[in-house]
Image (cartoon, helix red, strand yellow):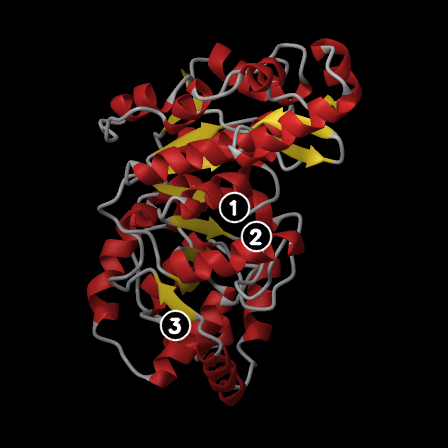
Amino acid sequence: MKENNWRYNEVSSYAVLQDCEQHSRGEKGKGLASYKYWLSCLTFLAGKKKICLEAMFGGAREIYHAEENDISNLPFLTDREKELLKEAKKQSLGKLLQELDDIENAGIRLVTWQEEEYPGKLKEIYNPPYGLFCRGKLPDERQKAVGVVGARICSSYGKIIAEKIGQGLAKAGVAVISGMASGVDGAAQSGALLSGGYSCGVLGCGIDVCYPAMNRKLYDDLIQAGGLLSEYPPHAKPHAMYFPQRNRIISGLSDCILVVEAKKRSGSLITVDFALEQGKDIYAVPGRICDALSYGTNCLIQQGAGVFLNMEDFLREMHIFAESGENSSLKQKNHLENLERLVYSCLDLSPRSIEELLKETGMPLGALMENLETLQEKGCVSEIYRNYYIRSDVSV
């Protein structure tokens, strides 16, 4: 093991990166890749500890072949981590090579921290992931990126707003970073892809595991038109402790974080904490004070977060300006017939039942259904579940 005159706790992750980068840049070959794959798959070690190990031993290969006494003398590993590392060193190199071939054949690539493709933004965070398993494209360092996060079980309002935000960011050339979760995350990412933009999903499981399963279409779309990444090895099942950890990557890849809906105790607020530690700005979509899903966002605003009221002002604060032009939904509303306007005026982003609409409009059932159908064809109204309707042409 190399002699070192500094202690682990006194060196930042970024300093370690620079210290070891030149040594690692020239290393190539399938054999070396298998050692990096081995180190990337050690989920019991934090990324910063893996990076420090490489700096101390000189590379992943040297860690794999290190003497047990050298492992035992490491000051920054716990006793449990030392024992697990010793056990992990017994893995067959031939098996590692086979696993590496298998993931490459599945279209999965591994990018470790010293490679040029590794996102530079992640090198600046406190605990950068050592390796990233990727499908699709990694975020472009030159492109502005916004992390859009929020409640998994969100309201219809939250889902619509998140999708519109994703669309607006994409049209302005801004990448959308999120966790591919159900609810706000998935809606924002779907909106970005729908508008031809780029979105990256950061997973809390193996890169070849689609979680939640209901987001299979989004998962496939991100591979084709965006990107997916995970610091966890392929086949790793979703684990409760993985999701808070992956949130530091979402914030690390983002220039700011935008929270759409969040309860008092929400995983989205963990992402906010990481972002604040990383010096990122926080924005929140305000909500009604009586809604549990608005508690988290309203508290963020009370504590000093930026208020998201519309896309134009938000882009201006980020020094990005979208193309001007008349809003297409406004054009649609200007061409509504009188009865269509009446039905439309009774709707908002809270679901309204047929019974409620019959009472408010005073229209016969047949006429109401006919106008609802026409409004759906014009893209102004959506039936979110049987006989419940909301506006769907809201712009942000």
Residue hosting label 2: 204
Does residue 193 appear to the left or right of 121 in the view shown? right
The crowding category of the residue bearing disc 3, from other C-alpha atoms within 10 Å (few below 14, some 14 to 19, many at least 20), is many
The crowding category of the residue bearing disc 2, from other C-alpha atoms within 10 Å (few below 14, some 14 to 19, many at least 20), is many
Residue hosting label 3: 60
Camera sees residue 127? no
The crowding category of the residue bearing disc 1, from other C-alpha atoms within 10 Å (few below 14, some 14 to 19, many at least 20), is many
Instruction: Label 3: state its secondary structure.
Output: helix
N-terminal-most mark, 1 or 2: 1
Residue at 51 percent across and 47 percent down: it is: 246
Instruction: Label 2: state its secondary structure.
Output: loop
Q: Which residue type carries mark 3?
A: Ala
| Residue at mark 2 to residue at mark 3: CA–CA distance | 24 Å
Quadrant of residue 10 within the rendered picture? top left
Residue 179 shows which numbered tag? 1
- Determine whether label 1 and label 2 are within 8 Å by CB: yes
Residue sitting nearer the eye, 330 or 315: 330
* Mark in the foreground, 3 or 1: 1
Q: Is residue 49 above or below residue 264?
A: below
Residue sitting nearer the eye, 262 or 97: 262
